[in-house]
Amino acid sequence: MRKYRTFDQVEEEYYREHPEEIDSFLTVIFEEYAKNNDTGALLSALRMISRVKGITATAEAAEISRKGLQKALSEQGNPLFENVSTILHAMGYQLVPQALAMDVKTKRT
């Protein structure tokens, strides 16, 4: 029987082969999170990038245990803001505020 790879495996392999595209990927993921607050999708993306960059190396840079990193980014994870910031920093990124495009009449995005 033929064994097929999952989408996550294909996506992870792609970013291992194209690390220069991680920046754009994370930008899009955070833009999507800003629109729909889908924490699960955000954590899934961060989990995948941590695997690409190396879970152990990311955990060490964040000064948390490997298990702590995996728990924070798990599907059931509900990490504190500072944990997400620390993990992003360990992966070489930072959270930066960006002004929302506001509709002047309704004051909504």
Image (cartoon, helix red, strand yellow):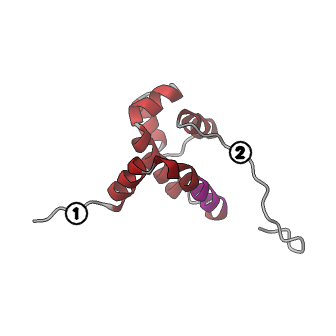
The numbered mark at residue 4 is: 1
Query: Magenta region's main secondary structure?
Result: helix
Give the vertical position of 2 relative to 66 (above or below): below
Q: Residue at x 39, y 55 (%)?
A: 14
Tell me the quadrant of the picture where the C terminus can be found. bottom right
Q: Which residue is mark 2?
A: 96
Q: Which residues are magenta?
A: 27-34
Alpha-carbon span between mark 1 and mark 2:
38 Å
**Quarter-of-image position of residue 81:** top right
The amino acid on which the numbered mark 1 sits, given as a three-letter code, is Tyr
Q: Which quarter shows the N terminus?
A: bottom left
Residue 63, numbered label: none
Q: Residues within 10 Å of mark 1 (few under 14, many from 20)?
A: few
Residue at image coords 63%, 35%: 82
- Asked which quadrant contains residue 11, the reply is bottom left
Residue 12, compared with residue 72, is above or below; it is below
In this view, which residue lies farthest toward the right?
A: 105
Q: Residues within 10 Å of mark 2 (few under 14, many from 20)?
A: few
Q: Earlier in the sequence, mark 1 or mark 2?
A: 1
